[in-house]
Image (tube, helix red, strand yellow):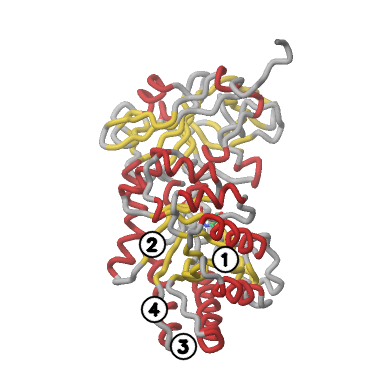
Amino acid sequence: MHLNGTAKINSLDHLEIGGVDTIELAKEFGTPLYIYDVGLIRERARGFKNTFEKMGIKAQVAYASKAFSSVAVFQLMNEEGLSLDVVSGGELFTAMKAGFPAERIHFHGNNKSEEELRMALEHKVGCIVVDNFHELQLLETVCRDMDQSIDVLIRVTPGIEAHTHDYILTGQEDSKFGFGLENGQAEEALLRAIKSSHINVLGLHCHIGSQIFETTGFVLAASKIIGKLSEWKVQHDYTAEVLNLGGGFGIRYTGEDDPIPASRYVEEIISEVQKKAEEFNLGMPEIWIEPGRSLVGDAGTTLYSVGSSKEVPNIRKYLAVDGGMSDNIRPALYEAKYEAILANKAGQPIQETVSIAGKCCESGDMLIWDLPLPESAQGDLLAVFCTGAYGYSMANNYNRIPRPPVVFVENGHAKLVVRRESFEDLVKLDLSLID
Ligand SMILES: Cc1ncc(COP(=O)(O)O)c(C=O)c1O
């Protein structure tokens, strides 16, 4: 069994994370429960940051907060000196509640509302990543109205899409995000923006995909964008200070995944940008990246209690847990695969193969198919690994199931950072028909 970070099996045969026995966590906080290994998040953050520092490159590592947004995780990322990528007024509000320095917040999104742009300007966020012509116009109007100026990155689609081990060159740049680099839209956006006295174009941004295990896509994207910047230098006397290559760095969910260290992505991106910048006689831009999953994904574990089981003769055994697609929609949404163990029988030999069902009223609510486990029984605790990214942040109240709490563990201490939703919370927005 592959264990991440500080996870280990203790002398009681229990899964321990951050020096805390997970059985004790279940007793104290109940199940389902999201557990985050804070030491591992710090290690991942430093993996990216230290490589830039070692290579003497000006950089920002922005945590893509969509992976897991909460006050505590934003405070942790701030402690580690990271920047923050937010995509909505809600994520920005959470960042403000966390006391995150606004100048290190980058505001993304393909349909920012006027209210969100005003909010970003009021809080003086570090930059806005402009996604389309509508937004550019709206931002100009809002800036003029508020008598403020703002730094922006122009989000471009470089015609490269990366998925896990493949990257695809997409000629038509068919995406809901950003301005096409090849079809002239990015250049048009630049020309409109640099005419504005309120908008300062810091540079360009792209995000080529998610759960990517190779550096090729990033290197190609960097190369294409710098090629275009070299043309814009000659044609428009424009020099970018920043090149943001987005996130998407892959993690290990199961034995099928073979991630590479953060340092490899960073080193290869830097060396391509340096090479191209020299080739075209451009200054070295700052390099920004936006990892989400690779900072928090494998630091998260979800602990469930085993409830009912059902044997379908000669076919399979279903084991149902007290959560499911309400706390982890990824298996139902895109057949995401996970590994899991019985946290209270962690050292015991494998004796059966079971399929883990959620408790939601949906046949597709299956968390794991064909999982090898020790003999399981009602009341056992199932620990599903690598649920730290896009788990809590995509959690929902389907079937009016309250969202689980989140606990941070580090150096033998557990701290509750998101409390469990109550039934009262579930109805707090509901209004009665009866006066
Ligand atoms: C613009 C942008 N940046 C960063 C990310 C983070 O990606 P990941 O969590 O795969 O690192 C995303 C994910 O959708 C994104 O859209």
Looking at the image, tell me whether mark 3 or mark 2 is earlier in sequence order.
2
Return the x and y of residue 417 as percentages of the image width and height: 39, 32
Label 4 and label 1: CA atoms lie apart by 19 Å
Look at 46% across and 40% down and name the residue there.
94
Q: Secondary structure at mark 2?
A: strand
Q: From the Cβ of disc 1, is ligand 1 less than 8 Å away? A: yes
Front in this rendered view, residue 149 or 175:
149
389 horizontally vs 191: left or right = left
Residue type marked 2 = Gln
How busy is the neighbourhood of tag 3: few (under 14 within 10 Å), some, or many (20 plus)? some
- Label 4, on which residue? 284
Residue type marked 1 = Arg
Look at 32% across and 53% down and name the residue there.
81
Return the x and y of residue 435 as percentages of the image width and height: 70, 10
- Label 1, on which residue? 155
Front in this rendered view, residue 11 or 72:
72
174 horizontally vs 105: left or right = right
Q: From the Cβ of disc 4, is ligand 1 less than 8 Å away? A: no
Quarter of image, res 309: top right
How busy is the neighbourhood of tag 4: few (under 14 within 10 Å), some, or many (20 plus)? some
- Identify the image quadrant of the N terminus: top left
How busy is the neighbourhood of tag 2: few (under 14 within 10 Å), some, or many (20 plus)? many
Quarter of image, res 265: bottom left
- Label 2, on which residue? 60
Q: Secondary structure at mark 4?
A: loop
Look at 29% across and 71% down and name the residue there.
56
Q: From the Cβ of disc 2, is ligand 1 less than 8 Å away? A: no
Label 4 and label 2: CA atoms lie apart by 14 Å
Residue type marked 3 = Phe
